[in-house]
């Protein structure tokens, strides 16, 4: 090997900075070249993760205005007023790539990071929901990842004392090489305690507290170590971040105490980009600068290079702007909670992040060059050449499956769906989480949206996460819009009013036109759905480059929604409530089975497409169900989603232990009507005397509504009739298929054991 | 005047606020006791709440045992003061030797967080006044190290001397076998809670403080908290003597 | 075949945060212990391998240690021979 071959690429490229970006950096430094430390700082701040350089132009199109919004995108978390002087803070964020490398610590630090985003704003974290996606559950690698991620979520959340109240666990082959770990956190604050991540007031102290700084998460920038700084043993340069939930718990208490006592002028947590990110973002937001004294930063180990200190992603750290006269009090609080604390710099008025070591200035960069004025790329979007469009609403149906005619027993299909990896009970995972700490959990994980009472009021917060990748892979607009529709519907069927939307956009490599098209379509779907439903997007996170050797993930817009229920006494759940209650089907099934769980079992017909979404109807059905619940007409409310009507009504039965007998009119094909996943449909129950009023109310909202049966017995019985033949089926041509009739006990059995079996946790 | 009940806060305690709330509901005056303080502020009883004291990284409860407040709690218990440890608090009491047995890693080697039913074995102790013997009380468990262990001789002695306070029970109301889901951690003889020989210090793994209101799914833990507070009130009224009955 | 007894000590990689070690250090004050630092907490496994010779046995333990007992991303291991047959205890740093 010749010397020439050993020549490596220029440093900036090895740090992931392109030649164009280097040029843009020079332009922001009055034409001079950045030194290595500055280049390292730019490389992390101009990463996709910190700068949103590919997605920013798209995200600007999202609706952000909404009733009660106190803080929106750009802050650590969205904050919305809920009355009584209180506000809710919430946000969802990804930790996909770290979890692929080290599932336990990746998931754990994902929980830690999103919790910090919440308490940074002065909110006490009250709940976590985790949306997880993995490849084939039979694959040993998947099982290893599931086990590690589940333990990591639990290990961190359980210890820090924030209940894990919901989330998702979805298997899809596209995640085989690239799992998704999206974590949503919710916090509650007194509105007057709202604290922003800014460093105002030149002369104020910049204080770092929490854990000490080590070589965690240096990752790609570690090339600097070998290139310029030292010849240390590479094993001493770990890039895996390790979470310390105990330190986080202390950090929560100390931070909230500091805020409560008015001791900080601004507060920012340290995540990606470490001290560089925290100082530049807080300075930029306040229009100030910060002078950092590198030697003052408490270290976990000796010999850290300046760039390592500046970009380390050591966990459980916070950065505060503090009035000089408050320093002693701040120190006392941190000391009492056993947290290292140090003054690491001062707020200045020059707008620069300047780094001083041993009295020498070793870096100076305008704060805005690292953050708000970071580079933005115009990426190229191009749809794939072959696409399938959704059938238009009301279009004649192409019957893609003739399941009962084919001789398949619909009861067997229902059992297969209930026992499938994606639709079976998540209990074997959720029971590894503490879902009740905090003593506010009214409805925990596993049965629709989570419900948390707001202590000291009659109110409750209702939260859920939903993401649709199976339709999204064919039609990314529809996948995103369906995700918003389902998440908000899950909140509305409790009676709560959705307040806002947070989102985690998981997509592929944005420099690939098709992947960027998926992202732009996803954002368009998110925006359209939020506008139609009148909801603001209050923040979120973008995770790109979700690709592995086996390809890109299916586009996955993960949607988190928080809703407010004014009077918890009106809360409605999905389970049947009482024998003899009338069962109503609201909405109508549309054609299309592609992307459904049924299609996952039975296969997709080539001429078929995903079902269509009518956003106006979705808005109407949500308004209807909230009104019906507020009028006290509804006993239980369940939405029809994964597994279609069959799985929806089976869940109502299993969760109550009560059977039901219904007649389902087949408007399309038995498969579509029983197991299709077309949106904007509900299964409601009510006392028999309210059934007529409910039907009328639904029609007033422009919705089809029909009483299809009643609650009772210990079996689920679904008779299939020709459309329009209810009550007189025989006269109209007889049954189109055998009735489905399964004991509720049998439904529960396959549902409860499905996941553990799929994962090999039980035989 | 409401009876003062201390709630110890270790760094890493995370059920302290829930415990304070439950004590409020019962009508007691909760007094927060910080781990660095030696004084118990003249409380009539002490609760060690759940959580992960000092992170619980080494062995649940072991580090908390050496804190200043625990020296005082041990003295208080030695004088007959009422002490209840819940979950991590039980682990701290066991590590401190204030209650018998040890809490080992769950048999499943996984954290367990779900609802269980525990049945009082006695109704004549400071912690189980007015509870129905053998009737399952629904409340959550949430722990990674809760498998009650003692050697067979000790177990026999605990049963003989009436120191077993609660057992996990299955849906039929029978003590749940260690491999049954109703016994969430594989505890020997389905033991969910025990007390010391004198009957003034008790620990249990499940969380009665999270099951004190119907809205949270169960109020069947309320009676345990109420029993503690009533016993404490009686103890204050009657001086330092212990209420309830100790070992038989 | 001969029996060889080994111990595998797994500890956090240098530089990796060790919350357990930190928690122990933080608690020493309460015990009145001073002057202790750099506490690193790991795990130890002891095992017996049947093999024709020690190098073969050690290779088995190496594989076990690197693939099963330790997580190479965040931990290192050390193999000790603790056989009664051999009084000498040798030790060797893990491959990572």
Image (spheres, grey):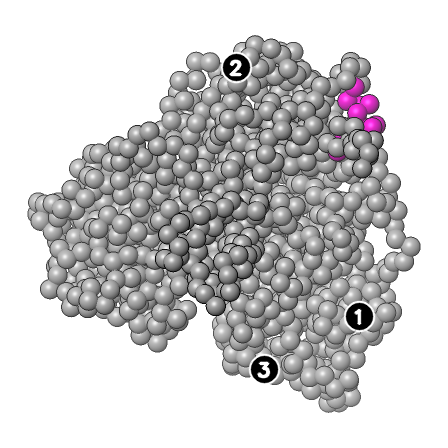
The answer to which image quadrant residue A235 occupies is top right
Q: Chain of mark 1?
A: A
Parent chain of label 2: A
Tags 2 and 3 touching, CB below 8 Å: no
- For disc 3, the chain is A
Residue indicated by mark 3: A742
Give residue C91's position: percent from left, percent from top.
46, 46
Q: Which residue is mark 1?
A: A604
In three-dimensional space, the C-alpha distance between marks 1 and 3, rounded to whole angstroms, equals 26 Å
Say few, some or many: other residues with alpha carbon within 10 Å of mark 1 (under 14 / 14 to 19 / 20 or more). some
At a point 80% along the width and 15% down the height, the residue shown is: A31
The quadrant where residue B177 appears:
bottom left
Task: Identify residue for label 2.
Answer: A204
| Residue B214 as seen in the image, left or right of residue A506 | left
Q: Which residue does the image show at 79% across and 63% down from the upper left? A: A610
**Is residue A494 left or right of A538 when viewed as pictured?**
left
| Residue at 57% in and 15% down | A357
Q: How far from the left and from the top, in percent, is residue A244?
A: 47, 40
Q: Earlier in the sequence, mark 1 or mark 3?
A: 1
Dot 2 or dot 3: first in sequence order is 2
What secondary structure is marked by label 2?
A: loop
């Amino acid at each position: 090997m010749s010397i020439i071959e050993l020549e490596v690429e220029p440093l900036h490229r090895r740090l992931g900075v392109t030649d164009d970006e280097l040029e843009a950096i020079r332009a922001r430094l009055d034409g001079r070249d950045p030194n290595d430390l500055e280049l390292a700082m730019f490389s992390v701040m101009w990463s996709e993760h910190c700068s949103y350089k590919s997605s920013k132009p798209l995200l600007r199109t999202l609706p952000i205005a909404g009733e009660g919004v106190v803080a929106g995108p750009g802050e650590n978390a969205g904050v919305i007023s809920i009355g009584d002087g209180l506000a809710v803070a919430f946000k969802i964020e990804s930790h996909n790539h770290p979890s692929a490398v080290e599932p336990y610590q990746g998931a754990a630090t994902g929980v830690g990071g999103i919790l910090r985003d919440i308490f940074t704003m002065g909110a006490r974290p009250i709940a976590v929901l985790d949306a997880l996606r993995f490849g084939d559950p039979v694959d040993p690698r998947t099982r290893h990842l599931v086990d590690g991620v589940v333990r990591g979520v639990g290990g961190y959340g359980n210890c820090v004392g924030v209940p894990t109240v919901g989330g998702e666990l979805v298997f899809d082959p596209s995640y085989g090489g690239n799992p998704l770990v999206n974590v949503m956190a919710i916090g509650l604050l007194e509105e007057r305690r709202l604290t922003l991540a800014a460093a105002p007031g030149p002369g104020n102290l910049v204080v770092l507290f929490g854990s000490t700084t080590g070589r965690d998460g240096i990752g790609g920038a570690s090339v600097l170590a070998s290139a310029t700084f030292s010849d240390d043993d590479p094993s001493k340069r770990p890039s895996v971040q390790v979470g310390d939930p105990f330190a986080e718990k202390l950090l929560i208490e100390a931070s909230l105490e500091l805020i409560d006592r008015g001791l900080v002028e601004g507060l920012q947590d340290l995540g990606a980009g470490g001290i560089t990110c925290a100082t530049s973002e807080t300075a930029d937001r306040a229009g100030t600068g910060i002078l950092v004294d590198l030697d003052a930063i408490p270290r976990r180990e000796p010999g850290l290079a300046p760039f390592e200190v500046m970009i380390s992603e050591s966990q459980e750290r916070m950065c505060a702007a503090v009035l000089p006269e408050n320093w002693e009090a701040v120190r006392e609080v941190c000391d009492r909670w056993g947290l290292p604390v140090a003054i690491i710099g001062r707020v200045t008025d020059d707008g620069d992040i300047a780094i001083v070591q041993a009295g020498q200035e070793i870096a100076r960069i305008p704060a805005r060059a690292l953050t708000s004025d970071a580079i933005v790329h115009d990426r190229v979007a191009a749809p794939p050449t072959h696409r399938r469009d959704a059938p238009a609403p009301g279009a004649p149906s192409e019957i893609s499956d003739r399941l009962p005619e084919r001789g398949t027993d619909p009861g067997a299909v229902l059992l297969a769906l209930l026992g499938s990896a994606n639709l079976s009970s998540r209990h074997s995972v959720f029971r590894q989480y503490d879902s009740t700490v905090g003593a506010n959990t009214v409805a925990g994980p596993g049965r629709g949206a989570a419900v948390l009472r707001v202590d000291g009021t009659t109110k409750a917060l209702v939260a859920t996460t939903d993401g649709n990748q199976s339709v999204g892979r064919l039609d990314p607009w529809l996948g995103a819009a369906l995700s918003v529709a389902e998440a908000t519907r899950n909140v509305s069927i409790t009676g709560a009013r959705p307040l806002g939307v947070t989102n985690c956009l998981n997509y592929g490599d944005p420099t690939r036109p098709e992947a960027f098209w998926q992202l732009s379509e996803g954002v368009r779907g998110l925006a359209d759905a939020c506008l139609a439903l009148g909801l603001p997007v209050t923040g979120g996170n973008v995770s790109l480059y979700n690709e592995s050797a086996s390809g890109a993930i299916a586009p996955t817009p993960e949607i988190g929604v928080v809703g407010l229920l004014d009077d918890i006494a009106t809360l409605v759940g999905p389970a049947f409530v009482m024998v003899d209650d009338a069962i109503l089907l609201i909405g109508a099934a549309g054609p299309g089975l592609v992307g459904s769980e049924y299609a996952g079992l039975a296969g997709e017909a080539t001429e078929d497409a995903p079902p269509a979404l009518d956003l106006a109807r979705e808005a109407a059905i949500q308004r209807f169900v909230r009104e019906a619940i507020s009028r006290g007409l509804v006993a239980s409310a369940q939405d029809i989603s994964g597994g279609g009507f069959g799985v929806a009504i089976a869940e109502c039965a299993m969760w109550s232990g009560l059977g039901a007998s219904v007649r389902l009119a087949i408007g399309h094909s038995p498969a579509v009507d029983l197991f299709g996943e077309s949106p904007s449909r509900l299964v409601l129950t009510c006392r028999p005397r309210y059934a007529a009023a409910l039907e009328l109310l639904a029609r007033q909202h422009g919705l089809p509504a029909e009483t299809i049966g009643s609650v009772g017995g210990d079996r689920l019985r679904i008779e299939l009739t020709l459309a329009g033949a209810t009550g007189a089926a025989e006269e109209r041509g007889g049954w189109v298929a055998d009735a489905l009739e399964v004991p509720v006990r049998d439904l529960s059995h396959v549902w409860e054991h499905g996941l553990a079996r799929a994962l090999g946790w039980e035989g | 005047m409401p009876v003062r009940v201390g709630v110890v806060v270790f760094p890493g305690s995370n059920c302290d606020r829930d415990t304070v709330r439950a004590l409020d509901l019962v009508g007691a005056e909760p007094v927060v006791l910080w781990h660095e303080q030696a004084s118990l502020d003249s409380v009539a009883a002490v609760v060690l709440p759940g959580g992960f004291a000092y992170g619980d990284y080494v062995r649940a409860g072991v580090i908390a045992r050496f804190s200043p407040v625990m020296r005082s709690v041990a003295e208080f218990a030695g004088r007959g003061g009422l002490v209840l440890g819940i979950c991590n608090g039980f682990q701290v009491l066991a590590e401190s030797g204030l209650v018998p047995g040890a809490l080992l890693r769950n048999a499943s080697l996984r954290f367990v967080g779900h609802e269980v039913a525990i049945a009082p074995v006695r109704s004549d102790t400071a912690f189980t006044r007015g509870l129905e013997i053998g009737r399952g009380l629904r409340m959550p468990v949430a722990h990674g190290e809760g498998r009650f262990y003692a050697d067979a001789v000790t177990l026999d002695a605990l049963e003989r001397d009436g120191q077993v306070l609660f057992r996990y029970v299955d849906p039929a109301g029978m003590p749940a076998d260690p491999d049954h889901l109703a016994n969430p951690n594989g505890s020997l003889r389905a033991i969910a809670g025990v007390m010391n020989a004198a009957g003034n210090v008790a620990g249990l793994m499940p969380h009665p403080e999270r099951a004190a209101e119907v809205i949270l799914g169960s109020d069947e833990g309320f009676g345990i908290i109420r029993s503690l507070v009533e016993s404490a009130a009686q103890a204050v009224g009657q001086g330092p003597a212990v209420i309830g009955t100790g070992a038989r | 075949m001969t029996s060889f007894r080994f111990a595998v000590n797994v500890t956090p990689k240098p530089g990796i945060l060790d919350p357990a070690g930190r928690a122990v250090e933080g608690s020493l004050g309460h015990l009145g212990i001073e002057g202790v630092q750099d506490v690193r907490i790991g795990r130890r496994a002891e095992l017996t391998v049947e093999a024709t010779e020690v190098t073969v046995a050690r290779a088995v333990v190496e594989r076990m240690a690197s693939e099963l007992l330790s997580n190479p991303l965040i931990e290192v291991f050390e193999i000790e021979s603790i056989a009664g047959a051999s009084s000498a205890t040798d030790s060797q740093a893990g491959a990572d």
